[in-house]
Image (cartoon, rainbow, N blue to C red):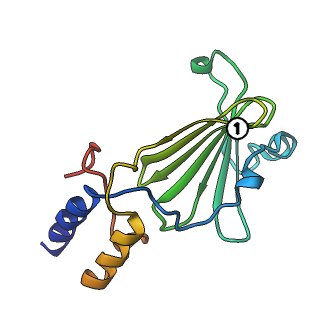
Amino acid sequence: MKQFALAVIFLLILNTCKAQERNSKINLKTMKTFDIKKFEENKGKQGFANEYRYILANKLNVRELDITSNATQNIKTYQREVTKEFDPNQSVYNYYKTGNIREEILLFNDSEIKILNYDESGKLVNEINFDTIFKHSFKEIRDIVLKEKNVDIYDTRQATALRHDTPDAV
């Protein structure tokens, strides 16, 4: 019953969210390009076809993939997913066949927060921020819930906060 009450509180609070503040800072400069040579040398060695996984010094988990498929009409593309254990924030980077960044997607519990699109030279050409209409940031919500309920929504072992418009939200 306590978990249900917390879930209802989260849903009500999240309904008034605004732009998300990143809990895990990622060095975007190193994410701007995809090291194709390193990927090709390491893919498949860990038991995952067309994948290479590693952990950065700051304990961020990185999963790199070759996502060439019929859906992309066999156009060579790459993807890098960056996560941290028990953290609801995730960054997904998509790259052109040259290794230059094509798209950056920021997520909170699998809900898209922001999408940045780049041209083939790496210049930002479009930005979509899905949280600009909300009144409170996730950091503000986190502070409120920590103070009132002693629950950290940035720790998925303690709570999972979903947006009201997702199929998993109750």
Query: Which residue is pictured at 65% across the width and 32% down the height?
Result: 67
Q: Residue furthest left?
A: 1
Is residue 107 shown above or below 3? above
Query: Which residue is pictured at 43% across the width and 72% down the height?
Result: 155
Is residue 83 shown above or below 100? below
88 or 22, which is in the foreground? 22
Query: Which residue is pictured at 64% across the width and 15% down the height?
Result: 73
The N terminus lies in quadrant? bottom left
Q: Which residue is mark 1?
A: 50
Is residue 86 shown above or below 112? below
Question: Can you give x and y, in whole percent of width and height, for residue 109 in the image?
Answer: 41, 55
Quarter of image, res 79: top right
Query: Which residue is pictured at 81% across the width and 31% down the height?
Result: 98
Question: Can you give x and y, in whole percent of width and height, for residue 56 in the image?
Answer: 72, 65
Task: Say which amino acid is labelled 1.
Answer: Asn
Question: Can you give x and y, in whole percent of width and height, for residue 105 in the image?
Answer: 55, 44
131 or 155, which is in the foreground? 131
Question: Can you give x and y, in whole percent of width and height, for residue 134 in the image?
Answer: 32, 54
Classify mark 1: helix, strand or loop.
loop
Q: Which class describes the residues within 10 Å of circle 1: few (<14), some (14-19), or many (20+)?
A: some
- Residue 116 as seen in the image, left or right of residue 2: right
- Residue 2 as seen in the image, left or right of residue 39: left
Is residue 33 shown above or below 58? above
